[in-house]
Amino acid sequence: MSLGAPDELRSFWSMPTADVLSALQSSASGLAADTAAERLARTGPNVLG
């Protein structure tokens, strides 16, 4: 699963934590600074509205 597959994460609350983290290509301690910067540059900030 990749970040481009939101339909597969619609029921993330019922998935094992390890599966969600894997799908998001993350870890329990979060993203590395360089990965976070790359995602921010690619997709923009996480804002509502």
Image (cartoon, grey):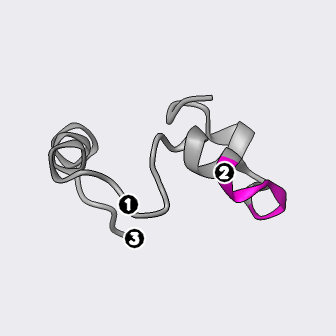
47 lies above or below 34: below
> Which residue appears at 77% of the width and 64% of the height?
13
Which residue carries the number 3 mark?
48
Residue with the most extreme right position:
14
Quadrant (top left, top right, bottom left, bottom right) of the N terminus: top right
Task: Tell which tag, 1 or 3, sits nearer the viewer.
Answer: 1
User: Where residue 39 sits in the image (x, y, percent)?
Assistant: 26, 43
Badge 2 crowding class, 10 Å Cα cut-off, few under 14, some 14 to 19, many 20 or more, is: few
Q: Is residue 36 magenta?
A: no
Q: CA distance from mark 1 to mark 3?
A: 21 Å
Looking at numbered disc 1 in the image, what kind of residue is underneath it?
Gly
N-terminal of the pair, mark 1 or mark 3, is 1
**For residue 29, which quarter of the picture?**
bottom left
N-terminal of the pair, mark 1 or mark 2, is 2
User: Where residue 42 sits in the image (x, y, percent)?
Assistant: 22, 37
Q: Which residues are magenta?
A: 13-18
Q: CA distance from mark 1 to mark 2?
A: 13 Å
- Give the side of residue 14 with respect to residue 7, left or right: right
Which residue carries the number 2 mark?
18
Looking at numbered disc 3 in the image, what kind of residue is underneath it?
Leu
> Which residue appears at 25% of the width and 51% of the height?
32
14 lies above or below 5: below
The residue lying toward the viewer, choosing from 40 and 25, is: 25
**For residue 16, which quarter of the picture?**
bottom right
Which residue carries the number 1 mark?
30
The residue lying toward the viewer, choosing from 14 and 43, is: 14
The residue lying toward the viewer, choosing from 14 and 4, is: 14
